Image (cartoon, rainbow, N blue to C red):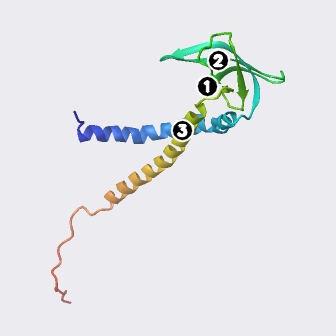
Amino acid sequence: MSDSPAKRHWRVSLFLWVGLPFFAVVGLVKAAPDLVPAWQAQSGSGVVGTFTALQESCSHGSCDYYGNWKSADGTSTRTDVLLYDGPDPMRIGATAEARDAGAGGGVYSTKGGSSYLLVTAFAIGGVAAAIAWPVFLWRTWRTWRSSRNRPTTPPEPVEVGAFPMA
């Protein structure tokens, strides 16, 4: 069953006017700051320590663990952080080796994972939306402006070979 052209136009307009700016803000504000730390953790950079799970948040068959992290040498700690790419069988009170690479919201499991790819995808999507939205606005403005400058009545036809008499 296909949608009517008017319904498709409404959906596209909603995406262009609301969706693109939303994706741009989310990608640039949330994902871009964690892009470098995610790749650093994936490559093995950062301070290694121990994450202790204190809170569990489960949804749709997967769980996120929040807790405290303490460096191996005991010189730095972080509280109420998320463990990215944590081990699957984990419970509250359990510990896991984790790396602090400077991400704002959490630390990364030393076992590795794919969160760096997700952060990268969101950051690239945010940059693409941030570029596409002004282009869309410019093209819309240009189309609107050119439609206002069109004459409302067609010009009168001119006969070929006719010269005005003065």
Q: Nearer the viewer, residue 96 or 3?
A: 96
Q: Residue 3's x, y, as percent?
A: 24, 36
What amino acid is found at the position of numbered circle 3 in the picture? Ala
* Of pointers 1 and 2, the one earlier in the residue sequence: 2
Query: Within 10 Å of the Cα at label 1, are there few (<14), some (14-19), or many (20+) other Cα atoms?
Result: some
Residue at 62% across, 19% down:
87
In the displayed structure image, the side of residue 158 where residue 54 appears, left or right:
right
Q: Is residue 56 above or below residue 39?
A: above
Residue at 73% across, 35% down:
45
SS at mark 2? strand
In the displayed structure image, the side of residue 120 where residue 140 appears, left or right:
left
Q: How many angstroms separate mark 2 from mark 3 (CA)?
A: 23 Å
Quadrant that contains the C terminus: bottom left
Q: Are marks 1 and 2 in contact (CB under 8 Å)?
A: no
In the displayed structure image, the side of residue 159 where residue 136 appears, left or right:
right
Q: Label 2: which residue? A: 66
Q: Label 1: which residue? A: 85
Comparing marks 1 and 2, which lies closer to the viewer? 1
Residue at 75% across, 32% down:
46
SS at mark 3? helix
Comparing marks 3 and 1, which lies closer to the viewer? 1
Q: Label 3: which residue? A: 121
Residue at 16% across, 82% down:
160
Total tally of numbered discs in the picture: 3
Query: Within 10 Å of the Cα at label 3, are there few (<14), some (14-19), or many (20+) other Cα atoms?
Result: some
